[in-house]
Image (cartoon, coloured by chain):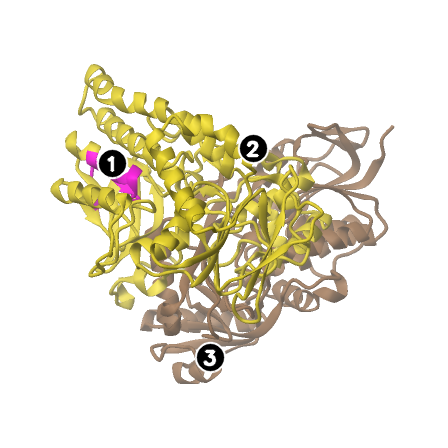
Amino acid sequence: MTETYDLGVIGGGVHGCTAALFAARGGMRVALLERGPLCREASGVNAGTLTLQMTRLALIPYAMRAHAMWAAAPTWLGHDVGVVVCDGLSLAFTDAEAELLRFRATKRREAGAPIALISGREAMAVEPGLTDRALLAGHCKVDGFANAYLTGLAYRRALLKAGVALHENRAVTGLEREDGGFTARTATGPVRFRRVLIAGGVWIERMLRWLGVELPIKVLVNQLVVTERVRPVMRTVVGIANGLLSLKQYPHGTVVVGGGWQGEGDRERGGVALRPERMVGNLRLACHAIPDLRGARMARAWAGLEAETADALPAAGPVPGIPGAFVCGSVHSGYTSGPYIARLMADRILGREPEMPLFPIDRLLAPRHAGTPEAA
Amino acid sequence: MRQADLIVLGAGPAGTEAALAASAAGLDVVLVEEAQAAGGQVWRAPYPGLALPKPDEDATAGAALRDRLVASRVETHFNARAWSVNTLPEGGFRLDAATESGPLSLAAPRLVAATGAVERVIPFPGWTLPGVVGLAAATVMLKAQAVLPGQRVVVAGCGPLLAAVAAKILASGGEVVAVVDRASRAEWLAATRHLATRPRLLARGLGWALRIAGRRVPVLFGHAIHAAEGQDVLEAVQVAPLATDGSFAAAPPRRFMADALCVGDGLVPGAEIPRLLRAPMRFDRTLGGWVPQVDAEGRTSIPGLFAVGDGALLRGQAPAVHAGRLAGLAAAHDAGRSDAAAFAQASAADHAALATLAPFAAAVSRLMALRPGAVRAIAPTTVVCRCEDVTRGMIDAAFEDGAREVNQLKHFTRCGMGPCQGRSCGDVAAEILAARVGSREAAGCWTGRPPLRPVPLADLLGEFDYADIPIPAPAPL
């Protein structure tokens, strides 16, 4: 008889890995199943931005705590993921953008983000690489970025050390409720657990269907560009008021340009192609903000998937009507806030009261699913 | 957006012949090339204004090809850096390039990828020293720039380019202190039967060999570079004999003083466009590595996409001419410009020629194929990825840390993340990982992404005002 784990986590991104890590440290026997290597989808290919100025209002308190976790990654994760904490600027180039920025920065400040509105001139003192064409800037001291591609390596070491049974390259093809627990089907045999956490990013829609739950998840295909190493051209995280630019230079000299310009792809094929005119649009915006960037050469562009619920707020909580089943994902700016929300999730699974509320999915389900009483 | 019937990327023998054949068959063809003229590597044109002292056979053939191109209706774009190729939702392809006159966008229902091969160098200590260049780079210096790679040159690696480069250096007044060939005498003898199927080329090769022998240049068969020495530039080269599996035999290296080392260990198909567009690929060691699955006329599994020349199947220049012509004829046929009978008639000679040339091409490819023992012999401290300074030891350590596939290896080490994006190091890095995970198929294929070549942002942007940037609607607050 094979072991029945206390918790099975399906999906090895930031959410699944963090929840698995804290559940294991909380005393549970945990198995993590991932169809590929750890953090090779959104968690490994995102822009790594740890900003509050693109974070959704409701998530600001979470993002603040998550930012502190990332900054202190060596203490709880045990490994560095190249986190740099620095100032962040959100720019407005037109009157309409300035109005948008004033509104959004004020709202975010009310939610707890330490954002100050400064003039374009003042912003140039914060960021010497900045254009002189900004009218207004949101300035936030709590900003920064990680080296997203190091995420998998860091979590892999931490999970193994915590004693998590790690099953990479092992796709789950189905999930059944059996004997008060769950059995995950894989090509190399079943894995049994008493509780299950579904943390499969854009694929949680399909995974929840295994449990008869219909949670629509929209798939975003975010384009990104990285330049070759260049001399220092900037020292902050730079965005624009409407959120469609994220820009920073890594210590090794490469500049990553993102902002959620949409490429081609879907759940089945991944982010398969980039739209050249949108790469050009994104790069024009970047070079408009940091003019010295024009001399850099593009080394690579890619696209990664991001999951979004109908109200663009997280799906993080118990699966209604199915005791022992949980879901965690679809967190806007999920890389930033992921570790904190997934840690709350682990607390909930461990039977502890999370220090901040989760985001139960009942609100997102069709009425026939929402709150269906479970026959014990 | 310039709308055409056919886009051809790469103006080497395969691409130029494809463009000429398709154009002659009535298609509106646009040919895009990063160099300043057509010809590719073998028929490379001298730089403008540079008169070569003694044009050789290749220079003459290249000039003839360029003349035919000028006389044709093919629209050409030279010095054009293609950076993006996409399939369009309505079918067909879009290509974006940075050119001297600004950004260029092309669209066509069909695209021929004829992007040639990339040289492989099996790393050794000191291979990144100034003075160490690829065999292909040496041919660029000699053919396009009339420059010697050095005064005292060691020529090393494998394949016919060895003798060609050594003979060209001698003819241009340089000294070759040694020719170092990974292939043994026995391997050359075994190949001769096949090489004799093209007597003229064999004779040309023998001519090179005679020139080398006539100058009493030591030719070391079954040897390879053990190390390159020098403080800031190359000063000496260590050469050691090989065991039968391609690793170094237990014998002390010989030392040659040299100021240049031209080294190339075979070619890897530059199949970036099929990879980028997710065409099914297969690994074939004797064809240089990962190659797209193509039919007899170069059609990939993606409708309208052709891949020909050394960027598809490593067969060399003469087969590339015929493969290119077949793709051009096939593109025209697929576009309805010829019926089945006319197409069969037009393409018969090229199919026959390819069959005749096949044994020679296969024999040369075998001589140039990557030998696993040669990769096993790379020392832990030797740099494999020179853009990011990743050593062999770091690749092995990444495997120990859980990396099982090349794209994961990249995340763990930055191997292949630099300007070359794995074009130089990718094949050897994958071979190192493959030795641990069991096969090249298991180690996987590097994900293809734009840009096809590094491109300055300034060259992509064009003239614009802030108001021209089509910024999407803001994300929700």
Secondary element at tag 2: helix
User: What range of the chain is rendered magenta?
Assistant: B1-20
Q: Are marks 1 and 3 on the same chain?
A: no
Shade representing chain A: brown
Residue A340, percent across and down? 68, 59
- C-beta proximity under 8 Å, tags 2 and 3: no
Q: How many marks?
A: 3
Q: Which chain is yellow?
A: B
- Give the crowd class for mark 3: few <14, some 14-19, many >=20 residues within 10 Å: many
Q: Which residue does the numbered mark 3 point to in the structure image?
A: A127
Chain of the residue that carries numbered disc 2 in the rendered image: B
**Mark 2 to mark 1 CA distance (whole Å):** 36 Å
Chain of the residue that carries numbered disc 1 in the rendered image: B
- Please name the residue shown 33% across and 44% down the image: B42
Toward which corner of the image does residue B358 lie, by quadrant? Answer: top left
Q: Is residue B206 left or right of residue B74?
A: right
Q: Which residue does the numbered mark 1 point to in the structure image?
A: B17
Secondary element at tag 1: helix
Q: Which residue does the numbered mark 2 point to in the structure image?
A: B186
